[in-house]
């Protein structure tokens, strides 16, 4: 039985499809790595991007939060720049800074450096997912990739950016070059997601982390075509396609239209309102403020209850998650308690 | 004739009131200071918070962008932590970092340090505004202050914060202490705005820079009462009250309800949609993406035109501005050209 068949009846996959579930499934963005002490111990002395190429290590890090918290899905431990590194771009992840690109992309000649990704470039991914699905059994593994806009923002800025001014200057000022850049990134992203699905990932999430910095008309004109291309490329596999960005309240409808089966929502928009913006036929994921986990346990439960109530009012499939990644200094115990609370309060 | 009388017929004040104007008025958040070469020269060797206490210097810095760009309003050169420094809190602005508070506020005993602000604490403000209004004549001066939530976030975190987790933990976990903290800050803020209005400011803008990190229900419960208190305290002067925060698409209606006459909008929400959220009887300010100024001039004009068209479609008073502050590396020439474009294209 394939990994996809084994996980088809899981609460996570069923909720993505809007089917009935025994309890609301829950997982957390950034659940793997970052804050868990057992992760920090494993990673000691190993640079981030090196760790992503070590199948046994990736497997162990991906499994840690599943074991510890009892979440309903594993999310593949990786980084959004992994496929760019794999095709030979000179970039690294600097601790405390983020991805840093040695030679930013600024002109048409730079596009030549963006060759397509071959499965052989990321054989460690195929290997790790093989190990993972064997361990996970009926628990789904979520594969993931960064979306073309967010990848482009790192490549054009040369690193993390608060205001994305170089990215936007290129987008507005050289729209043909911009379109070709995002089109190349869409191919790379689609290839990377295909590798993960073919190796056994039961769902994929496309992270457009920074696309919330765009107004809707610009999103539609400059970004949506490349996201559509990515989602179309993996539509044939029939695995749920999730899509998320932070601060995307104005873009939720368009992000669904781009081809997502599940739209992730940050904590700024209540889920019943999000459902109105996304429209029928799609599930929602989210949306507890990650900062709530720093409050006392009864507050966490009350705020989680608000999320569950809004989800129930929306009438669509719901995967409980935070409205952004787990913050680095979050107490892991608070996360475990939250998983338990969501399961207990939604059991049918 | 008082400064308020002298400026009552200005396009800026008239637009704030929804009255007809000879052209759409324009000014820019952060127009004073930051990027202008003549500013950087003046400030050489003078720490930020020291510069805010020097009336002649403040006057010159405030006037520089009015002279250079021909904007329709001056905005008082200051910083949101100035009133907190003036009541004796030990804080400073670290270049490249932002406000840093020596002893963050974490418990009830810390509230005692938040005494009310007396006009004598900021006599340099009264003096500078006297000098300014004499120079400005019919051009209005906008006074400003940080709103209680944003001030609280600096005081609780001890400095700038990406996720505001300590602030939110206090807000959710100790709601009585939180309420009292924001109430103290509302008094200080109101006193600081009164000083500016009595000295001659023709309008005031309350900056709740980081309040966009809250969902609407939390804004209403934990923040809105303190903002209402500030706006109520200055209502009697009859000067326009502006209100702005970044990423506040979900909060626009509530921020208007809090007592603003003009609601500032960042670039994520088109102004016609913003008008629907804010409701009738209020003007709008905004909302060109500051990053657009890094694109070629024809693109800047096309995007500014989109803003003006959406404003016209909204049918309310409109003050043209960016959707956030001028970015530090913006070319001043691009700003001057934009002012000219807005004036030319809206002349009646």
Image: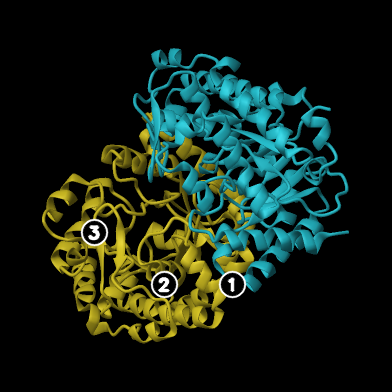
Chain colours: A cyan, B yellow
Q: Is residue B11 left or right of residue B284?
A: left
Quarter the N terminus of chain A occupies = top right
Q: Nearer the viewer, residue B226 or A139?
A: A139
Q: Is residue A217 above or below residue B240?
A: above
Dot in front, 1 or 3: 1
**Label 3: which residue?**
B62
Which residue is found at the position 49% from the left and 24% from the top?
A: A84
Residue B1 appears in which quarter of the rendering? bottom left
Q: Secondary structure at mark 3?
A: helix
Give x and y (percent) for residue A315.
83, 53
Q: Are marks 1 and 3 in contact (CB under 8 Å)?
A: no
Q: Return the chain for callout 2.
A: B
Give x and y (percent) for residue B341.
38, 39
Quarter the C terminus of chain A occupies = bottom right
Q: Which label sits on residue A296?
A: 1
**Label 2: which residue?**
B239
Dot in front, 3 or 2: 3
Q: Return the chain for callout 3.
A: B
Q: Is residue A241 above or below residue B217?
A: above
Which residue is found at the position 75% from the left and 37% from the top?
A: A261
Which of the two discs, 3 and 2, labels the residue nearer the N terminus? 3
The image shows a total of numbered marks equal to 3
Whether labels 1 and 2 belong to a single chain: the reply is no
Q: Secondary structure at mark 1?
A: loop
Q: Secondary structure at mark 2?
A: loop
Distance from label 3 to label 2 (Cα)?
20 Å
Q: Nearer the viewer, residue B223 or B73?
A: B223
Residue B131 appears in which quarter of the rendering? bottom left
């Amino acid at each position: 039985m394939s990994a996809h068949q084994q996980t088809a009846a899981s609460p996570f996959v069923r909720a993505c499809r809007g089917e009935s579930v025994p309890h609301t499934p829950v997982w957390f963005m950034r659940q793997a790595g970052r804050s868990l002490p057992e992760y920090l111990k494993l990673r000691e002395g190993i640079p981030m991007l090196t760790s992503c190429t070590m199948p046994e290590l990736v497997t162990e890090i991906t499994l840690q939060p599943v074991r510890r918290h009892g979440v309903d899905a594993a999310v593949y431990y990786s980084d959004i720049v992994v496929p760019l590194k794999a095709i030979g771009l000179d970039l690294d992840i600097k601790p405390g800074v983020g991805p840093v690109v040695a030679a930013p992309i600024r002109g048409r000649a730079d596009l030549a450096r963006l060759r397509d990704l071959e499965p052989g470039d990321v054989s460690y991914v195929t290997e790790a997912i093989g190990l993972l699905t064997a361990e996970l059994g009926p628990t789904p593994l979520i594969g993931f990739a960064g979306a073309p806009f967010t990848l482009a923002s790192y490549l054009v800025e040369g690193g993390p950016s608060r205001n994305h001014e170089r990215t936007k200057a290129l987008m507005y000022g050289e729209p043909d070059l911009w379109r070709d850049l995002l089109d190349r990134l869409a191919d790379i992203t689609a290839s990377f997601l295909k590798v993960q699905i073919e190796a056994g990932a039961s769902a994929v999430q496309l992270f457009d982390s920074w696309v919330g910095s765009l107004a809707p008309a610009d999103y539609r004109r400059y970004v949506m075509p490349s996201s559509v291309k990515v989602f179309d490329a993996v539509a044939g596999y029939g695995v749920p396609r999730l899509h998320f960005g932070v601060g995307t309240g104005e873009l939720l409808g368009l992000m669904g239209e781009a081809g997502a089966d599940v739209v992730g929502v940050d904590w700024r928009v209540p889920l019943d309102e999000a459902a109105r913006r996304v429209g029928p036929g799609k599930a929602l994921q989210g949306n507890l403020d990650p900062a709530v986990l720093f409050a006392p346990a009864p507050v966490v439960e009350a705020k989680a209850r608000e999320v569950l109530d809004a989800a129930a009012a929306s009438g669509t499939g719901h995967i409980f998650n935070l409205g952004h990644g787990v913050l680095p200094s979050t107490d892991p115990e608070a996360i475990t308690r939250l998983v338990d609370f969501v399961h207990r309060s939604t059991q049918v």
